[in-house]
Amino acid sequence: MKTRFLTCSMAVAALSLMGCSTDDDIGGSDSNAGYAYAYEADGGLAPQGGGGQFDDFTDNPFVSVAEQPVSTFSVDADGASYAIVRNTLRRGHSVVPSMVRIEEFLNYFTFDYPSPTGDQTVAINGEVGECPWNTDHRLLRLGIKGKELTKSETPRANFVFLVDVSGSMSTEDKLPLLKTGLMNLVDHLNPDDRISIITYSGKVVKLLESTPVKESQTIKSAIHQLNASGYTNGGDALRMAYEEALACYDEKANNRVIMGTDGDFNVGVTSTDALVEMVESYASKGIYMTCLGFGMGNLNDAMMERISNKGNGNYYYIDSEEEMVKVFVTERERFVSVANDAKCQVTFNDQVVSQYRLIGYENRVMSAEDFDDDRKDAGEIGAGQTITALYELVLVDGADGQAADKGLVTFDFRYKKTLQNASIPLTLPLRVGDIRANNMLSDNFYFAAGVAAYGMLLRQSPHKGEATFDMARQLVNKGLSFDPYGYRKELKELMAIRSEQ
C-alpha cells in the first residue's frame, strides 16, 4: 500500500478534469481512485504536508475456488473509516475512495447476533442469500459476537491516556472535544480503576501519576489543565506511555494506552514503521492500544490504523460529542478484549462455488497456514462487540438445485481468551439448503448488504455491479428494526446527504 497526497492545486485540477467542483460528491470517473485529498481543519482542501494521510488500496478481486479454495483473514473491529466519511459528508465535501474501508463501515454498527453460550467468549453465525447488486450471485454474511460482561466480570482498568497537546490540536474539534470525552469517561469508570495522563508537544510530560478513579477530582483537575501549543513529539511520548503502563501493570487488569491525536508527529520518532515496531514490542508484553483520531487538518489515518492494528488495539475517529459518548460511555466495555488474535477462515466447496470475493478486509488478509499458527498476530474483539464479514459468491451452474445437504462453505474461527492462551477453534458449516429465499433473510443480512453497497459506491468499486444509492438506502431501511442507540437511523440520514448534493 502507498500513502498518497494531493496538493490543493493538484486536487482542484483533478476534480476539474472530472467535471466536478471541489464541493461535488463522488463523480463517475475512477481517475481519482487511490488518492487521499488533504483537508484543512474546516473541511477544505489543504496544501501537501498539512492534510489527511490515507493508505490507498485495491478492492479484493474475485478468486477461483479451483485455484484457491480457502480464504483467511484477521478480524477488524475498528469503525474509524465510517466516522471519517460521516464527517466529510456533513461538511459538504467529496469522499475520497481511500477513506472508505468497508469492513469498518460494517463494524461501526452493532448487529443483532446470538451471544456466546457456556464457557465460550465468542459466538459465530452465518446466512446466504441473493446478492442485491448482482442477482446471479449469492451473498454470504458471517457474524461474530463477543461476550457481554457483567460488572463483576469486568476487569479493573489500568488506562494511560496519551494526549497530544501540540498546536495542531487547538481547534474545537480536537483537544476540547477530547477533554469532554475524558471527563465523561471518568464519571463512568469504577472507583478502583486507575488513570495516568501523559501529554506531549515539544516536550513529553507526565501530567498525572497513576491515580484511582475514586480520586476523580484530582483526575478532572489534570484534564482541565490540558492546553494545546508547540510541536508534536509523539514517538517519545508513546514510549513513555507504554513504560507507564508497564510500571503499573496488573495481570488481572485491562492494561491499555489510549492515545488521542490528529497523528501529526513531526518531532522525534516519526516513521510509521518505527512506531509499528515499538507498539508490537509492547503488545507482546500485554499492553493494548486504542487510537482516537481527531480533526481533518493533519489527520494521519494511515499511521493510526497501522499502529492500532499492530498494537492489539482499535482505532476510532472522533468527530462529535455524540461519538465521544458512543466510544467512552455507550460502548466502553469494548475496551476489554474477550477474543484475542481472532482469525477467520472460509473453505469453499468447488462443486458448488466457482468464485468468491471477500468484501473489505483488504489489509487483513492472511495466508492459509497462518490460521493455525498461534504465533501470528490478528485482531481483537471487545466485550459485546459484533464483527461482520461478507463474501460475494459465484455458484457453479445448477448449484441451487443440488441436494440440500451438499456442503457450500465452512466457516472456521480461532481466538484466544487471553494473549497467553492457546487458540480455541469454532466451526460453522453452511450447506446448499442454507441458501435462503429473500423473504427468509434476516434484517442483519439486509442491513449489512446496504452498508456494503453504500461503501462500494463511495469507493467507486469495480465490483459494485447494479448497486445504486437508492438500492443501498432501501436495503438499510429493511434493517432498522434493531437500532438501540439510533446509529442505523443516523446512517439513513447520512445517505440522504449524498442524494441532496
Image: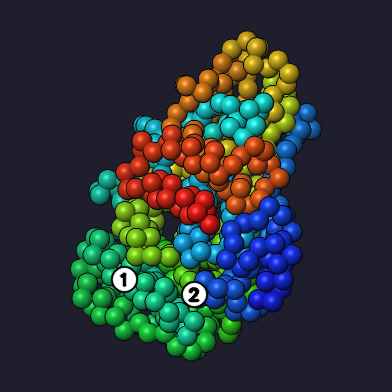
The quarter of the displayed image where residue 384 is located: top left
Q: Residues within 10 Å of mark 1 (few under 14, many from 20)?
A: some
The quarter of the displayed image where residue 112 is located: top left
- Marks 1 and 2, how far apart at CA: 20 Å
Residue 126's spot in the image, x, y percent? 51, 30
User: For the N terminus, which image quadrant?
Assistant: bottom right
- The answer to whether residue 479 is visible is yes
Q: Nearer the viewer, residue 421 or 92?
A: 92
- The answer to whether residue 414 is visible is no
**Residue at (48, 26) in percent of width and height:** 441
**Residue at (58, 55) in percent of width and height:** 100
Q: Where is 444 relative to 217, above or below?
A: above
- Answer with left or right where residue 349 lies relative to residue 217: right
**Residue at (59, 42) in percent of width and height:** 468
- Answer with left or right where residue 56 lies relative to residue 385: right
Which amino acid does the dot numbered 2 rest on? Asp
The quarter of the displayed image where residue 206 is located: bottom left
Q: Which mark is residue 243?
A: none
Which amino acid does the dot numbered 1 rest on? Thr
- The earlier-in-sequence mark between 1 and 2 is 2
Q: Which mark is residue 42?
A: 2
Q: Which mark is residue 180?
A: 1
